[in-house]
Amino acid sequence: MLIIVTGVSGTGKTTIGHMISSHLEIPFFDADDFHTKENIAKMSNGIPLTDEDRIPWLERLADQLEFHKDKGGAVLGCSALKEAYRKVLAKSNEIIWIHLIGSEDLIWERMKKRKNHYMKASMLSSQFEIWEKPSEGICLSIDESPEAIFSKAMDYILNCAEIK
């Protein structure tokens, strides 16, 4: 089972992704851990990544998912802001998509509280500018508690697993 939890920075991809991976007993991977030093330096300096910066990163993530496909699966937390990015990640047609969405104001407040993260809160608006509404999967509002979001995500995941 391959699951990708998406959303702009600060939506809770890591929190929800860890909850799902723990429940399903499969590994969780944070896409942030796969960025190159150059990408991290750009983001640390408030410079948004370009498509050219992201494509090799997305390809590494897709390879990571493919590696785990026959090993029981994995959960990936990744912004996957554009449909084109999601297509790069979707080497497998077995991906279950969970998209976390919320208002820019709510996410901004969350991000201002973050410490020791290279993605600066000031870059949030650049992510909202390029975000494209997903064509597959389920969109879950981050207005609820992590437990409520996790519960809805698991209901969706288990429903998808029954269909496949």
Image: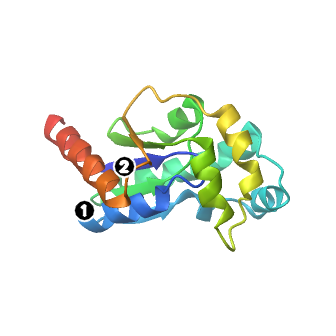
**Location of residue 24 (image quadrant):** bottom left
Earlier-in-chain disc, 1 versus 2: 2
Q: How many numbered circles does the render carry?
A: 2
Query: Which numbered tag is attached to residue 24?
Result: 1
Residue 39 spot, x, y in % from top left:
76, 56
Callout 2, which amino acid? Ile
Q: Is residue 71 visible?
A: yes
CB contact under 8 Å: marks 1 and 2? yes
Instruction: Give the residue at the far bottom of this rendering.
Output: 116
Residue 163 left/right relative to 18:
left
- Report which quarter residue 116 is drawn in: bottom right
Q: Residue at x 21, y 46 (%)?
A: 155
Tell whether 89 sits left or right of 66. right
The kind of residue tagged 1 is Leu
Residue position for label 2: 3
Residue 31 lies left or right of residue 67; in this view the side is right
Asked if one can make out residue 25 in the rendered structure from this viewpoint, the answer is no
